[in-house]
Image (spheres, grey):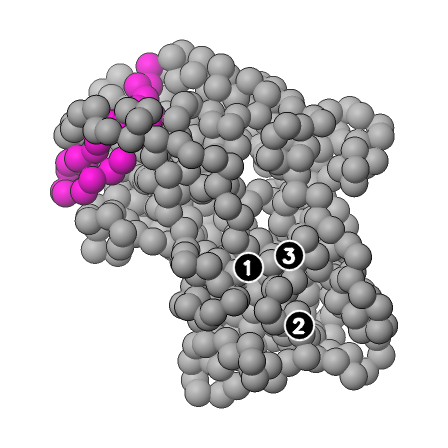
Amino acid sequence: MAHIVVLGAGLGGSIMAYELADQIGKGDSITVVTKDPKYHFVPSNPWIAVGWREKEDISVDLAPTMAAKGIKFITTAAEKLHPAENRLELVDGSSISYDYIVIATGPELAFDEIEGLGPHGGHTQSVCHVDHALAAREVFEKLVANPGPVVIGAVQGASCYGPAYEFLFIVETALRRAKVRDRVPMTFVTSEPYVGHLGLDGVGDTKGLLESEMRGKHIKWMTSTKVKKVEAGKMTVEEINDDGSVKGEKELPFAFSMMLPAFRGIKAVSGIEGLSNPRGFTLVDKHQRNPKYPNVFAVGVCVAIPPMGPTPVPCGVPKTGFMIESMVTATAHNIGQLLKGEEPTNVGTWNAVCLADFGDSGIAFVAQPQIPPRNVNWSSSGKWVHLAKIGFEKYFLRKVKKGTSEPYYEKMAMKMLGIDKLKEVTKG
């Protein structure tokens, strides 16, 4: 009889628990440990920040679903993982022993790495958490009442760029609807070497599509840019040349700013030799298994993935929903094999599927595999993306509430591309 612990209950952790429930045998048990009893659909946070959604619209109480699946659910934050002892210490002083553990914590948001960044004592907003988005809404409402410059983007070391572009265009749409867009200069600031790089060296024509959208909506942009510091109403940035030298320094005034931070691993799983890298991300092999501690697995944003290559300003690689889904499925089946006395053989496909909503239109892309060169390298734009994002939000929230584990991203990719044999491609 094996006890499996899933640490975290976000996108990766919740579906990890559901898929594991289909793999374990009689007498085996699953415990989910999370600091938040509710699941929040993070992709909807930009809508929360402009008042298009309420917190309860994108929240699911996980306890009833976990109970129905026979999964123990503990809502206490982790203090420290002790992998050599097969023990997870919690902040209340208690400990949980395990036979296998899956780390699915998501990231810690590294606002503190830049002076004045972030909503906790800083001067910029965030859409990384639903409570951040609610705080951003208050500042956005002040912007509508008293229009001024807007600066939106992603700082050096960031690895999640899609939400920055989404929020940029959602804010632009919201300002037009409020009839104050003509009084709001907008600038997009990013560490990417070019618009639409996304930490993936682009997908299809994301560069052309996003530049065209910005030009059409009178949005200026700055690439290969470092945020030096943020003060009240003012951001100091450095533009970087290809050789890494500083091209120039600028001060950008703002009445509203949202900048995505860099990520790092949470403290509970950081600083453990052989388990985590210097940023605190968990080291795994192709089976999502830690090389030093073979009963430790990891999925999602907390997994260590090296950058694609050098860029003038550091850019991380995103862990998209499709990639996380493939990590989860591979991990569930690998643990299932181990429980049967077999060696793990399953490998995640690590592809990317994304719907980037712009409020009234959007851009969609499919990258298979996520890191080039690719078998599928496709992007498209149109109003259909906005409608598809709404449909996906409703579908996914229903899925989490019901506790199902079907491969939603793969189905979405098949519909977008209209390729009947895409399933074979995603596994190839």
Name the residue tied to disc 2: 295
User: Which part of the image, by quadrant, shows the C terminus?
Assistant: top right
Q: Quadrant of residue 237?
A: top left
Residue 252: give x, y in percent of width and height: 18, 29
Q: Earlier in the sequence, mark 2 or mark 1?
A: 1
Task: Compute the Cα span from label 2 to label 1.
Answer: 13 Å
Residues marked 3 and 2 touching at CB (< 8 Å): no
Determine the residue positioned at 71% across, 43% down: 349
Q: Does the magenta segment cover residue 182?
A: no
Residue shown at 40%/11% (left/top)?
216
Q: Residues within 10 Å of mark 3 (few under 14, many from 20)?
A: few
Q: Position of residue 201 (x, y in %)?
A: 51, 28
Residue corresponding to mark 1: 283
Identified by mark 1, the residue type is Leu
Q: Which residue is mark 3?
A: 285
Along the viewing direction, whichever of 264 and 343 lies nearer the viewer: 343
Q: Is residue 402 visible?
A: no
Q: Is residue 229 magenta?
A: yes
In this picture, is 45 found above or below 78?
Answer: above
- In the picture, measured across the screen, residue 256 lies left or right of residue 110, that is left
